[in-house]
Image (cartoon, coloured by chain):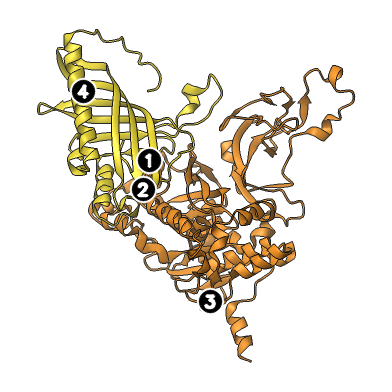
């Protein structure tokens, strides 16, 4: 996903900007739910067949990036390769009140930017699915002195279900090699 | 000499009293790099990561970068990743394939065996440099044990198998095929690496068999993420050890494990709910292992630590973890996940998913460990808190010899394993000879009996 999409660039017309507004609104609402710790409501934004994927990034020689830079979904060990059920288990774990890496709860702030639609199905004027690219900056502040920045890119596949947008696939590209955080308890 | 005495004083392994200073002190850490990490056998990587000539994988020994690579003659090398001219790293990549390691600084270049092969303008600028003397520094000893690559900087260190001693049988439980064939494990692509604000000894001690910390994993047990949890079963483990006698076993040299012994019947216990293919695979492997190994197949893996900083999970999850020392209060953790070379794809998919949800910074079990190791370290540096040593007295003098299992064995939850780990640490830190480090330590119960006389 770090590579440029092969699809033709969508036209920047009114339909595009209307749809981009919907995508942005979806992502901002999502960030609000997470930052307000409404984790269960956050889960409702995802389809039942969700794939939530974050590879590990490697330092590789110039020219080998497409082949080697990111660990591969369904083949390698990744940071995350989740479905809806396991993501809901992660939420439940936080809600036990004894998940010590999130108890007391961290203070988390999600910043979302650079939102663009890279693909839409079947068409811009009658969209039922779209692929949305964005950047994130997530700040986590924990207990007294701990703070972590997670910065990177996301690619989301939004699908309309019963007239509402839901996220069916999230790829997260975290711009770190050695993870500079002791844990990945925040949601991306 | 003064520091030798102070290390002997800081670790009173026999009475289970250990000074907090060993977890935070700058001087302690500097001495550890010299006395522990420059002597002991360290885990480097796995041969499956470098199958072809020219393949390399960048690893670490102590605080230093090393290159694990395979030369044109298929020989494996472990080389210090530092140019002999000005020290720049000659390899900046995590992995890849190459003919040569060329320093980016002044372009000295080295072959896959570490030999200095190129010095720019050598004839004009270096009258008579003896290139053979300026190869990349190679480890003193390197051993490939069932695919795992180990190395030491100490030419006097005993061979790896002697260094391991009887802990080998437990490490084998992680390295051998699930059906009892010897060796045959490979590493999944993707090594997890992350930084934790903890002294390296907290996780090493934890994996040496600290079963007492189970309450800190209550949250994952409550929600359930074990093989049966999609059916609503709580907990995080398979059912393999439900009828087994858990054993905590420690060895000379500071190694210690938590394994288990199944009853003589050694029956398979279904664990995988609706995952029929996974269930069939593990049942089949269990029966084949029984047929191959007989009574030996009763021994089951859980966790263990090979002194100083290599730990394993032996079954589910199945991984090798290295606690790289960054500083007295910072550790870089690397985890390599294992599977058999011929595990079916659908089983591998299940295993990968389970591993990722159990272990590492995104692991629902291990996240809580990181929190503990972080704040246990932080609480070891206060002027006042440092006056109060840690209590390692759990199940003191409750170990015994077991005819079937070599080593110092406990059948109840114990800190004997931690005491053995720190006894080993004290030996290294006081400069003990290899013969003493690897010698059988007197068992605490024997000492107590002698004291009664």
Of helix, strand and loop, which one carries label 2?
Answer: helix
Q: Nearer the viewer, residue A148 or B204?
A: A148
Can you see residue B180?
no
Does the residue at mark 2 contact the one at mark 1 (Cβ under 8 Å)?
yes
Instruction: Check disc 1 and report the residue beneath it.
Output: B346
Q: Position of residue A47 (x, y in %)?
A: 20, 34
- The image quadrant that residue B74 belongs to is top right
- Marks 4 and 2, how far apart at CA: 40 Å
Among numbered discs 2 and 1, the one appearing first in the sequence: 2
- Residues behind callouts 2 and 3 on a single chain: yes
Instruction: Check disc 3 and report the residue beneath it.
Output: B399
Instruction: Check disc 4 and report the residue beneath it.
Output: A23
- Vertical side of A168 occupied by A39: above or below: below
The furthest residue to the bottom: B453
- Residues behind callouts 1 and 3 on a single chain: yes
Number of other residues with Cα within 10 Å of mark 1, as a class: few under 14, some 14 to 19, many 20 or more = few
- Residues behind callouts 4 and 2 on a single chain: no
Chain under callout 2: B
Taking the image as shown, residue B48 lies to the left or right of residue B86, namely left
For chain B, the rendered hue is orange
Of helix, strand and loop, which one carries label 3?
Answer: loop
Does the residue at mark 4 contact the one at mark 1 (Cβ under 8 Å)?
no
Instruction: Check disc 2 and report the residue beneath it.
Output: B278
Q: Nearer the viewer, residue A92 or A38?
A: A38
Chain under callout 3: B
Does the residue at mark 4 contact the one at mark 2 (Cβ under 8 Å)?
no
- Marks 2 and 1, how far apart at CA: 8 Å
For chain A, the rendered hue is yellow
């Amino acid at each position: 996903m770090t590579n440029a999409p092969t699809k033709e660039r969508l036209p920047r017309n009114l339909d595009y900007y209307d749809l981009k507004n919907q995508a942005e609104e979806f992502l901002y609402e999502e960030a609000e739910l997470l930052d307000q710790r409404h984790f269960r409501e956050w889960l409702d934004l995802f389809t039942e067949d969700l794939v939530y994927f974050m590879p590990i990034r490697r330092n590789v020689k110039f020219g080998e990036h497409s082949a080697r830079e990111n660990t591969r979904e369904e083949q390698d060990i990744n940071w995350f390769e989740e479905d809806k059920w396991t993501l809901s288990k992660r939420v439940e774990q936080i809600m036990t009140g004894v998940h010590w890496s999130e108890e007391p709860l961290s203070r988390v702030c999600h910043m979302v930017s650079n939102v663009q639609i890279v693909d839409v199905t079947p068409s811009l004027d009658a969209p039922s699915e779209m692929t949305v690219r964005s950047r994130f900056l997530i700040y986590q502040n924990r207990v007294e002195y701990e703070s972590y920045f997670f910065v990177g890119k996301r690619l989301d596949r939004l699908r309309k279900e019963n007239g509402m947008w839901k996220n069916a696939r999230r790829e997260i590209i975290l711009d770190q090699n050695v993870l500079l955080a002791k844990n990945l308890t925040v949601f991306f | 000499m003064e520091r030798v005495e102070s290390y002997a004083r800081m670790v009173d392994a026999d009475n289970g009293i250990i000074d907090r200073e060993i977890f935070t002190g700058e001087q302690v850490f500097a001495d550890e790099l010299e006395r522990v990490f420059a002597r002991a056998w360290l885990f480097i990587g796995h041969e499956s990561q470098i199958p072809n000539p020219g393949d390399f994988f960048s690893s670490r020994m102590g605080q230093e970068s090393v290159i694990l690579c395979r030369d044109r003659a298929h020989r494996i090398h472990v080389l210090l990743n530092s140019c002999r001219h000005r020290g720049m790293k000659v390899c900046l990549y995590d992995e890849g394939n190459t003919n040569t390691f060329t320093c980016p600084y002044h372009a000295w270049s080295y072959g896959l065996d570490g030999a200095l092969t190129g010095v720019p303008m050598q004839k004009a600028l270096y009258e008579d440099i003896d290139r053979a003397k300026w190869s990349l520094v190679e480890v003193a000893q390197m051993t490939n044990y069932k695919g795992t690559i180990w190395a030491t900087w100490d030419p006097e260190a005993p061979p790896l198998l002697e260094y391991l001693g009887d802990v080998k049988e437990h490490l084998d439980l992680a390295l051998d095929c699930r059906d009892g064939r010897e060796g045959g494990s490979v590493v999944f692509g993707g090594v997890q690496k992350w930084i934790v604000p903890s002294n390296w000894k907290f996780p090493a001690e934890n994996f040496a068999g600290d079963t007492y910390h189970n309450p800190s994993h209550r949250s994952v047990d409550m929600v359930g993420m074990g093989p049966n949890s999609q059916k609503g079963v709580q907990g995080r483990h398979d059912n393999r050890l439900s009828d087994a006698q858990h054993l905590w076993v420690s060895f000379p040299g500071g190694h210690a494990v938590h394994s288990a012994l199944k009853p003589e019947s050694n029956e398979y216990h279904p664990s995988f709910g609706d995952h029929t293919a996974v269930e069939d695979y593990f049942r089949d492997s269990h029966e084949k292992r029984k047929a191959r190994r007989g009574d030996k197949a009763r021994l089951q893996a859980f966790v263990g630590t090979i002194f100083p900083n290599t730990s394993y999970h032996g079954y589910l999850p199945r991984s090798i973890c290295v606690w790289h020392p960054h500083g007295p209060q910072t550790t870089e953790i690397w985890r390599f996940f294992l599977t058999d070379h011929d595990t079916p794809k659908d089983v591998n998919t299940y295993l990968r998913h389970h591993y990722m949800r159990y272990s590492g910074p995104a692991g629902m079990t291990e996240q809580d460990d990181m929190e503990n190791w972080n704040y246990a370290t932080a609480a070891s540096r206060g002027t006042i808190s440092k006056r109060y040593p840690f209590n390692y007295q759990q199940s003191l003098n409750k170990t015994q010899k077991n005819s079937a299992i070599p080593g110092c064995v406990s059948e109840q939850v114990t800190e004997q394993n931690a005491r053995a780990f720190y006894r080993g640490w004290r030996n290294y830190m006081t400069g003990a000879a290899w013969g003493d480090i690897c010698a059988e330590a007197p068992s605490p119960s024997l000492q107590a009996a002698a004291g009664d006389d």
